[in-house]
Amino acid sequence: MNNDIRISLGLTDLNLTFDPNTEQHFSETNHNGTDTATWKLLLTYATTCDKCDNPMVNNGTKTVIHKGPRNAFKFQNFRIRKQKFLCKKCGHTSIT
Ligand SMILES: [Zn+2]
């Protein structure tokens, strides 16, 4: 994702990327005459355990929807898959 796209979407979190599991970066729906673009994003980064400082492994994702800024033409939502993490050493879990 380049910086122009980030700025136009109001995305400042550099750990956000377009979701590689989806073919299209966004989908558009029309609800009661209002267009909504839903951007499909993935939030992930490498992390270490809060408890024992070992590297954590990926442990699935949780999907959330955030309302984004409205531009002149439509509403924008961000569908974000948040990475979940598991520490194999102590069993501690966390999420982005
Ligand atoms: Zn741990």
Image: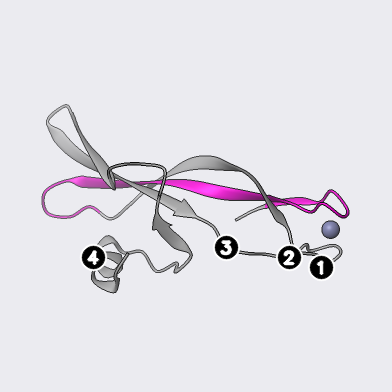
CA separation in Å, label 2 and label 1: 5 Å
Nearest the camera: 13 or 60? 60
CA separation in Å, label 1 and label 4: 36 Å
Q: Position of residue 3 (x, y in %)?
A: 29, 73
Q: Residue at x 22, y 40 (%)?
A: 36
As shown in the figure, which amino acid type bears the numbered disc 4? Answer: Ser
Residue located beneath label 4 in the image: 8
Residue located beneath label 3 in the image: 45
As shown in the figure, which amino acid type bears the numbered disc 1? Answer: Asp
Whether residue 39 appears in magenta in the rendering, the answer is no
CA separation in Å, label 2 and label 3: 10 Å
Q: Which image quadrant for residue 26?
A: top left
Looking at the image, is mark 3 or mark 1 earlier in the sequence? 3
As shown in the figure, which amino acid type bears the numbered disc 2? Answer: Thr
Give the position of the C terminus as an image quadrant: bottom right
**Mark 3 secondary-structure assignment:** loop
Looking at the image, is mark 2 or mark 4 earlier in the sequence? 4
Residue labelled 3 has its Cβ within 8 Å of some atom of ligand 1: no
